[in-house]
């Protein structure tokens, strides 16, 4: 398996369509695939990674720009693996790689709307560190990872997601 950045230079339509198809197939609907396109078009997308198996894109993850007050942070969503490639650790590898790159890029925080699964990567319940979800979502499912631990408990408030998420 190869994990790489999406490549919209060599064959942009092919790449965009392949990612769209993976995300739509994984979710069984098109809303999240459209969200990926919209985040890319608006410039909110910060990091878009794909997993390839035998030169075929089988999974995708996106991180986009969110804010707490005026402080830039990252929102992880969506992550998608084609059904026939699941339970092989592919999404986990995409998440790990995304966290590593974000750390190297000096990002401070990643938030995600998710479940227990994210705790193995270091995510914790956001409300415990004073970060809150703008959407009506159970607080235990709004998770945060501090990439720069000295900021823990120092950046607090409600997270502003890119407006594209409001339409989901
Ligand atoms: C969730 C998903 C991305 C996991 O992909 P994957 O490549 O199989 O993930 P991994 O192999 O790394 O991890 C496997 C385990 O973690 C869970 N998991 C992985 N990523 C997850 C995520 N983002 N949210 C919830 N659970 C997740 C899986 O259910 C799985 O559990 P199991 O193997 O013990 O049954 C995939 O099932 C999928 O595309 N689902 C539809 C889209 C979706 O719900 N995305 C998450 C919300 S954005």
Image: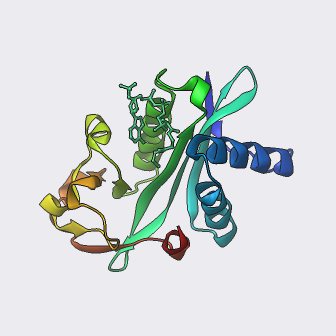
Which quarter shows the N terminus?
top right
Name which residue lies at 65% across and 72% down.
42
Write the residue at 52% across / 67% down.
168
Seen in the picture, residue 28 relative to 135 is either above or below; the reply is above
The answer to which quarter of the image holds residue 38 is bottom right
* Rendered-image quarter of ligand 1: top left
Position of 80 compared to 20: left or right?
left
Q: Position of residue 40 (x, y in %)?
A: 66, 62
User: Residue 138: image x %, image y %?
Assistant: 25, 61
- Relative placement, left or right, of 50 versus 97 is right
Relative depth, front residue between 43 and 29: 29
Residue 167 position (above or below residue 75): below
> Which color scheme does this rendered protein use?
rainbow
Residue 29 at what x, y percent from top left? 62, 52
Q: Is residue 81 above or below residue 77?
A: above
For the point 59% across and 41% down, the residue is: 26
Q: Residue at x 44, y 39 (%)?
A: 95
Q: Residue furthest bottom?
A: 69
Residue 75 placed where, x, y %?
A: 43, 59
Relative to 165, residue 116 above or below: above
């Amino acid at each position: 398996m190869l994990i790489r950045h999406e490549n919209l230079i060599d064959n942009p339509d092919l790449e965009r369509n392949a990612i769209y198809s993976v995300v739509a197939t994984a979710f069984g609907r098109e809303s999240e695939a459209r969200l990926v396109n919209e985040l890319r078009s608006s410039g909110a997308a910060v990091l878009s990674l794909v997993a390839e198996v035998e030169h075929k894109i089988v999974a995708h993850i996106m991180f986009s720009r969110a804010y707490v007050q005026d402080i830039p942070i990252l929102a992880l969503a969506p992550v998608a693996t084609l059904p026939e490639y699941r339970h092989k650790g592919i999404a986990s590898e995409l998440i790990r790689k995304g966290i590593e790159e974000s750390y190297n890029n000096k990002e401070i925080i990643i938030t995600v709307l998710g479940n227990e699964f994210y705790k193995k990567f270091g995510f914790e319940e956001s409300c415990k560190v004073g970060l809150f979800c703008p959407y009506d979502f159970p607080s235990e499912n709004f998770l945060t990872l501090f990439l720069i631990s000295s900021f823990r408990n120092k950046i607090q408030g409600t997270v502003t997601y890119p407006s594209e998420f409001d339409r989901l």
